[in-house]
Amino acid sequence: MKLRKFLALALAVTTVLSMSVLTGCSSNSGSSSEKSAETTETGETAGETKGEATNLKDIKIGFIFLHDENSTYDKNFIDAANAAKEALGLSDEQVIFKTNIPESSECYEAAADLADRGCNIVFADSFGHEQYIAQAAAEFPDVQFCHATGTTAHTAGLDNFHNAFASIYEGRYLAGIAAGMKLNEMIADGEFTEDEAKIGYVGAYTYAEVISGYTSFYLGAKSVCPSVTMEVQFTGSWYDETAEKEAANTLISRDCKLISQHADSMGAPTACESAGVPNVSYNGSTVSACPNTFIVSSKIDWAPYFEYIVNCVANGEAIDADWCKGIAEGSVVLTDLNDAAAAEGTAEAIAEAEEKLVSGDLHVFDTTTFTVDGAALDSYMADVDTDADYTPDTEVISDGYFHESEMRSAPYFDLRIDGITTLNEMF
């Protein structure tokens, strides 16, 4: 991930600087300050200056999706966009979808087209879209450009460029509890022994986002099934049904008793259904296709963010340069449990943990619950990019836990903890 992130970041910064020269560094419409990464006298930072209010009926928002409804990842965004549209009372003419937009210059072209068509807000949903959204933001200062999973908006120096994510590790931890409860049930039923409690995980890439996700899932499972171990198989793609199915089957052949995933197709869930292996999916319920094996799914609910950015423009208020919310705010949710597959007591165990997460009595990455190479951690310098100078490392462990998604919205937990084995590292 670091190489890809570095290249994307370098290109984005170069693009932003060059486009700023071409546009004379003009500020966003209605803004009273120049674009700057420095804090102003009012405490506002770049990406947070206020503008003029816009009547809600005059707002138009364009969405750029990497895939379409066939991808669970993109479907989750599409469903949230439709939910926000209904909640805000927007008409069909006020919302434009562009699907199957790759992480290439086609993204910039799509963003520019949406701006030319009168969109006040443009949103893109994939990490690799970021540099092209930054390019469009520099060229169209009167349009607000928002991007999911990115890392550069808070240091780019553009008032109209914004990143957003959610504390999905909280949801994955809770889903992990459901997995651990299922393992305990299977152990109690004599299907295998405690030392055979192994789960498999289908991951896309070795990015911090994926590592954070599978680690939080594992820690959730471990919190109720202490003997659990996990193996991770990477596919090298966010969406490759064949590769994801093959990865799941590989893990099943290696005696993994339950499978989860950070990948976007139905490959892994359907492989589990065919093999009769319990499955915890991601980004939405797969119960209709996998009625016998689906347990639960965690997901980010993007509707609150979409409503937030539209209301900001309508009210002439600043959009956060780097936005992140979690379970407490309704931005991270679990689907309904499938009682046909979930273990007895799962709902109660999840509810108890969720209450503690919200109250702050429980932290997902509590450093007393894991080790790295046999040792506990009391310090870790993470690559967070917290300022305009791109300071490479920031201390992220304090008060006994790793502070994920607090220094920036996008995940940066990239530790390889004990108990988890990765089977391939080419991605």
Image (cartoon, rainbow, N blue to C red):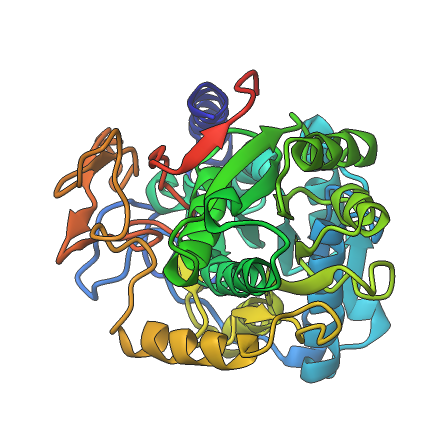
Name above or below for residue 258 compared with residue 339: above
Tell me which corner region of the image, top left, top right, bottom left or bottom right, holds residue 373: top left
Left or right: where does residue 104 sit relative to residue 228?
Answer: right
Q: Residue furthest top?
A: 426
Residue 416 x/y as whole percent: 36, 32
Residue drawn 75% across the image and 72% down it: 340
In the image, 180 versus 321, the foreground residue is 180
Q: How many marks?
A: 0
Above or below residue 95? Residue 75 is: above
Which one is in front, 343 or 265? 343
Is residue 237 left or right of 132 when viewed as pictured? right
Q: Name the residue located 79 percent from the left edge and 59 percent from the top edge.
A: 96
| 383, above or below 176, in the image | above
Residue located farthest toward the front when viewing the structure as drawn: 190
Residue drawn at x 48%, y 64% as measured from the top left: 177
Q: Position of residue 426 (x, y in %)?
A: 56, 16
* Among the 4 quarters of the image, the one containing residue 199: top right
Residue 292 coordinates in the image, percent (x, y): 81, 63
Q: 311 or 427: which is nearer to us?
A: 427
Instruction: Tell me, yes or no, if residue 268 can be seen here.
Output: yes
Q: Residue at x 59, y 41 (%)?
A: 201
